[in-house]
């Protein structure tokens, strides 16, 4: 466990380091620096949002999350969750499992079990160990919290299907690697694996360098505009 200031994701430094890689370099120039979004939420609110969003499409998740925030009177805090009636939270759209999960999150945040007040100062392994004590928070959810909330620079979510698919796309491979294979493949990218994961996501969302140009050429060859 570390209590000193830990390094945070640095988009410019990560892009500079990865620009020299034969596969990642073209992706860096194509997609730009790996800027991570800041949702402006405190740690508890972000974890509640993560639980609410699990296994839901974007629009439905946003709607339900907004209703949960309204049911809490706009105060997304552990005391507010513990005080809210089950009926109000279920009416907002939470399943029984998600309701149990955010109740557990609130209880463990309130009693210090997960130590959100000082989680910024602990290393990645300790932070994941703390967060996964909460019902409904697995390793992947904890890793997303580390990447996007704590802005840790070297998170490598090998179980993420998007990261695996993006890796295969960037490397021109027909099938994504397994989580175990991707774990080994990522070793050479320390301490920039958060940025590598970001580029994997972008490869899925945006395509890879040359892909769009090839698509245009195929369309023209078929007589398209």
Image: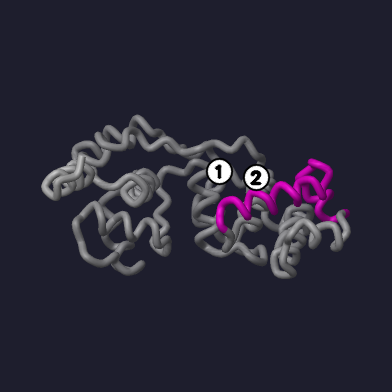
Q: Which residue is mark 2?
A: 43
Per the rendered image, the range of residues in magenta is: 57-83
Q: Is residue 61 magenta?
A: yes
- Magenta span: chief secondary structure: helix
Residue at figure coordinates x 58%, y 60% from the top left: 56
Residue at figure coordinates x 23%, y 43% from the top left: 212
Closest to the observer, 50 or 14: 50
Q: Which residue is mark 1?
A: 149
Query: Where is 56 relative to 70, above or below?
Result: below
Left or right of 59: which side holds 16?
A: left
Quadrant where the C terminus lies?
top left
Q: What colouring style does the render use?
A: one colour
Q: Quadrant of residue 174?
A: bottom left
Check disc 2: other Cα within 10 Å, few if <14, some if 14-19, many if 20+. some
Q: Which label sits on residue 216?
A: none
Image location of residue 7, percent across then percent down: 45, 38
Query: Where is 75 relative to 1, above or below?
Result: above
Left or right of 34: which side holds 71?
A: right
Label 2–label 1 contact, CB within 8 A: yes
Image location of residue 116, percent across then percent down: 67, 48
Marked residue nearer the N-terminal end (2 or 1): 2
Closest to the observer, 223 or 74: 223
Query: Where is 3 relative to 83, above or below?
Result: above
Residue at figure coordinates x 64%, y 47% from the top left: 46
Check disc 1: other Cα within 10 Å, few if <14, some if 14-19, many if 20+. many
Q: Secondary structure at mark 2?
A: helix
């Amino acid at each position: 466990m570390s209590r000193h200031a830990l390094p945070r994701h640095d988009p410019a430094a990560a892009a500079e380091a990865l620009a020299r890689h034969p596969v990642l370099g073209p992706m860096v120039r194509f997609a730009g620096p790996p800027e991570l979004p800041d949702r402006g939420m405190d740690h508890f609110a972000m974890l509640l949002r993560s639980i609410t969003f699990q296994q839901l499409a974007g629009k439905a998740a946003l709607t339900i999350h907004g209703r949960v925030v309204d049911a809490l009177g706009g105060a997304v805090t552990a005391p507010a969750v513990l005080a809210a009636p089950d009926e109000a939270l279920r009416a907002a759209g939470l399943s029984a499992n998600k309701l149990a999960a955010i109740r557990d999150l609130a209880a463990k945040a309130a009693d210090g079990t997960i130590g959100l007040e000082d989680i910024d100062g602990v290393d990645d392994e300790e932070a994941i160990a703390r967060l996964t004590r909460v019902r409904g928070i697995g390793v992947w959810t904890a890793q997303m919290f580390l990447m996007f909330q704590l802005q840790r620079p070297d998170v490598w979510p090998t179980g993420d299907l998007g990261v695996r698919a993006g890796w295969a796309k960037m490397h021109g491979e027909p099938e994504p690697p397994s989580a175990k294979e991707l774990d080994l493949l990522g070793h050479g990218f320390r301490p920039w694996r958060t940025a590598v994961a970001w580029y994997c996501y972008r490869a899925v969302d945006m395509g890879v360098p040359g892909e769009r140009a090839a698509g245009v050429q195929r369309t023209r060859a078929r007589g398209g505009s």
